[in-house]
């Protein structure tokens, strides 16, 4: 993984932050910024990424792990 090549253990920290963000979304799904009609964005702490997700009747659906320095048009087809 890219982050492990940058600094040993950083890839695991990235994984931990993605897991923590999923837990934050799971606990309070309406708390995060809407970026589409149904799509919301939860920023990761300490990394230039966000989770794009939609709320469904039986949980959440993560549609992208979006790099924040990439053109947002790249994720347009993953937003609802």
Image: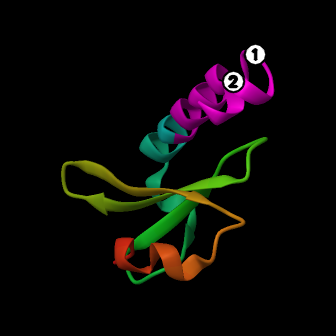
List the single residue furthest toward the left: 58
Task: Using the image, tell me which numbered label, if any, was put on residue 20.
Answer: none
First to last magenta residue range: 1-21
Q: Is residue 76 above or below residue 5?
A: below
Quarter of the figure with residue 47:
top right
Residue found 67% across the figure and 46% down from its top? 44
Task: Answer few, some or many: residues within 10 Å of disc 2's Cα (few below 14, many 20 plus, some between 14 and 19).
Answer: few
- x then y, percent, for residue 34: 52, 74
Residue 14 painted magenta:
yes
Residue found 19% across the figure and 49% down from its top? 58
Asked which colour scheme the image uses, the reply is: rainbow
List the single residue furthest toward the front: 5
Task: Using the image, tell me which numbered label, if any, was put on residue 8.
Answer: 1
Q: Main secondary structure of the magenta part?
A: helix
- Which residue carries the number 2 mark? 4
- x then y, percent, for residue 40: 49, 67
- x then y, percent, for residue 50: 60, 55
Q: Is residue 32 above or below residue 78?
A: above
Q: CA distance from mark 1 to mark 2?
A: 5 Å
- x then y, percent, for residue 67: 63, 58
Evaluate if marks 1 and 2 touch, with contact meaning CB atoms under 8 Å apart.
yes
């Amino acid at each position: 993984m890219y982050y492990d090549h940058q600094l040993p253990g950083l890839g695991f920290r990235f994984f931990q932050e993605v897991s923590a963000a999923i837990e934050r979304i799971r606990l309070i799904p309406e708390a995060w910024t809407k970026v589409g009609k149904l799509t919301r964005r939860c920023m990761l702490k300490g990394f230039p990424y966000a989770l794009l997700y939609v709320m469904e009747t039986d949980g959440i659906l993560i549609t992208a792990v979006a790099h924040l320095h990439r053109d947002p048009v790249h994720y347009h087809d993953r937003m609802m």
